[in-house]
Image (spheres, grey):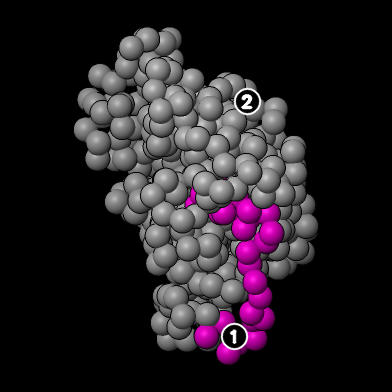
Amino acid sequence: MTFSRRNFVKTSVLGAVAAGVGTRAQGEDPRQNDAAPSGPHKRPIIVCANNGYAYLENAFAFLKGGGDTLDAAIKVVKGPEDDPNDDSVGLGGIPSEEGVVELDACCMHGPTRRAGSVGGVRNIKNVALVSKAVMEHTGHVMLVGEGAERFAVAVGFPRENLLTEHSRKIWLLWKEFHSTDDWWGPGLADPHWQAPAFGPAGKDKPQSELWQDRIQNLQARAGDLGIEPELQLAAVRKVLFPPTGTIHCSALNDKGEISGVTTTSGLAFKLPGRCGDSPIIGAGCYTDQDVGSAGATGSGEENIKVAGAHTIVENMRHGMSPQEAGMDALKRIVRNYNGDMNRIHFLDMTYYILRKDGAYSGVSLWEGYSKGHPHKIAIHDGALRAEATVSLLKGYSQEFPPFPDIPEDLKKGSEYLK
Ligand code: GLY
């Protein structure tokens, strides 16, 4: 086994993390404004995951003009929900293993201390708004599956096919790639049938060459399925490393009212019915009018186990700064794996945190996907910007499932995948 510099960096932090010690000093990062408990924080302010950046200007103008905080936050997340080219949320989301898009969302409205949530919703794209409708039009907090879809239709949301042609082709590529012992994919009689690299043709090849063959075959198959050449590598990477795209947004007005919302299509190719953290009040999103708001993107299963957003808000209630509060939640994720970097480097998590006084922080488990591509939080407080998160661990998360020698052009952040 080769022992890369990257492995060394990770291994060297193991002791510190296992001991419950962060690898950065709190408040060390000058980009973020939460170091002083009563610093020069600005209101109104909106913070969100970076895929909401393009929608912040409009939402901030709405908030500044007196619009409700939850409505402002939903204005941000509705952008990616409506965008067929954002395959992490709403219309065009990557589907479940059965090829069906299932969406999750939740929201909390600070001023009225109410919450709404939906999980596993099919055929309705704006699930953030549906979660708000659950809050406003029912005595419940959470609806799931068919009941949530029927409720959405009853209150006026249109049913539509959420599976775009592009997402369907990515799903079909995934289905065929995982299909060595069923009838999906070209049969032996197909002129394009290729002997599997791991069969007799590949028996003398090293693992890395076998994987190169598999990637080339996948890319060729992506072409056969009609995926445009410039999108083929991005499709291949989604097949090999299923993503968990999501968007969270929290908004605070000049009166100190605060709300939050999170929406997602969840983990790509998930088991039907799987709900991640996004629809779980207290995990994907939590807002307390007395304290602040927090939300998450990343490994949903890990975040549920630490009730991340609730943990962060409670930490702030007990005096931690937004950054300290988020770091503590991240350490709980690390603790759940006893600091075992062999597992933790396959996880990632980003928290977006907004305190009631306007202090905010974006924190993440790892610095980003790869060098030059940090995790980011987007902010509008009169100035629109994106800032790198402060990470608990130095270095970059690794792709899951494990993969020998990932080719450069398949790495997240590669020129091919922008
Ligand atoms: N964080 C999104 C999900 O895991 O579904």
The image quarter in which residue 95 lies:
bottom right
Q: Position of residue 252 (x, y in %)?
A: 60, 57
Magenta-tinted stretch:
150-176
Secondary structure state at the residue bearing disc 1:
helix
Q: Dominant secondary structure of the magenta stretch?
A: helix
Residue placed under numbered mark 2 in the picture = 409
Residue 338 visible to an observer of this rendering: yes
Q: Name the residue rendered at 68%, 54% in the picture.
A: 166
Determine which of the numbered discs, if any, sits on residue 153 in the image. 1
Residue 267 spot, x, y in % from top left: 47, 52
Q: Is residue 257 above or below residue 136?
A: above
Nearest the eye: 266 or 30: 266
Residue under the image location 46 percent in, 80 percent down: 146
Q: Quadrant of the N terminus?
A: top left
The vertical placement of 137 against 329, above or below, is: below
The answer to whether the residue labelled 1 contacts the one labelled 2, judged by CB atoms less than 8 Å apart, is no
Residue 225 to residue 386: above or below: below
Location of residue 171 with respect to 212 vertically, above or below: below
Q: Nearer the viewer, residue 118 or 342?
A: 342
- Residue positioned 67% across, 81% down in the render: 158
Tell me the tag on residue 47.
none
Q: Is residue 144 magenta?
A: no
Q: Tag 2: residue type? A: Asp
